[in-house]
Image (spheres, grey):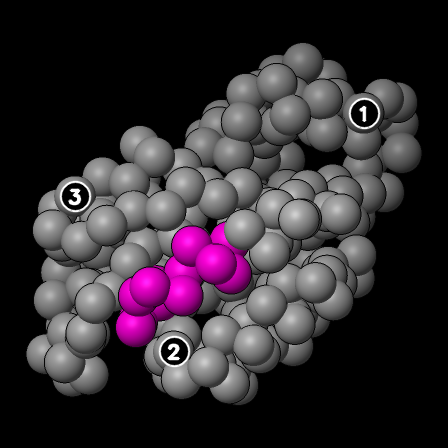
Amino acid sequence: MSLIDHLFQALSVYDDLLFDLDNTLFPTADYDRGAFADIAARYPDARGLLEYLTHQKELQGARYAHLFDDAATAFKLPPTTVATMVQCYHHHDGRFVQTNPAYLELLRKLQQRGHRLFMISNGRPLIQQCKLQRLGFSELFTDICICDGSAERPLKPDPRVFIALNDTYHLNKPVMIGDTPEIDGQFALACNIPFLHHCYHKE
């Protein structure tokens, strides 16, 4: 039995399913791959920049906040370069982001079985919407909440987004599914709901 089949079975005992996006339903490396290539193309004299960005992101992890600052320092680029890199990253077209058919089928089967699907994702709306457009499964979700750190949408693990969802949809037997126990798991704990740890897996 595949990992996704196991996930389907584990979720079958719940009613409302709250999914994280990044590295849960698709690998963020697919977005980074194209974004880093776009950035490196802007600085052809900085040989090895693409490899540096890719390696450092893999080494430091998804929450590495100083990637572009460190890249500008390592390659002796002007300080203004950082803002340009950030802008380029935020406006990348996500050309390498694609749906894994196994995950699309999982979501469809869950919806057909009567589960309500919700997405609660930390991130910048422009980037997350780009990913969702490429992935093409937004219509399967009853609601999508992009937590951008604003007062209305504070970042997980702050539970206020869950409270708002519950007020609107009267959630029944919810569970949080995500790849990061320190964020998604703590979010579930703050919301007093179960947490199911799942990292994206390409079978």
- Quickly name the residue at label 3: 189
| Residue 85 to residue 149: above or below | above
- Quickly name the residue at label 1: 51
Q: Nearer the viewer, mark 3 or mark 1?
A: 3
Q: Which residue is most to the front?
A: 1
Q: Nearer the viewer, residue 41 or 147?
A: 147
Calculate the distance from the C-alpha at mark 1 to the C-alpha at mark 2.
Answer: 42 Å
Is there a contact, CB below 8 Å, between mark 3 and mark 1?
no
When asked about the image quadrant of residue 26, the answer is: bottom right
Q: Give the class, few, some or many, for how many residues have Cα within 10 Å of label 3's Cα (few <14, many ≥20).
A: some
Residue 11 counted in the magenta span: yes
| Residue 117 to residue 179: above or below | below
Calculate the distance from the C-alpha at mark 3 to the C-alpha at mark 1.
Answer: 38 Å
- Quickly name the residue at label 2: 115
- Locate residue 56 relative to residue 39 in the image: left or right: left
Instruction: Give the residues drawn in magenta, as a range.
Output: 7-18
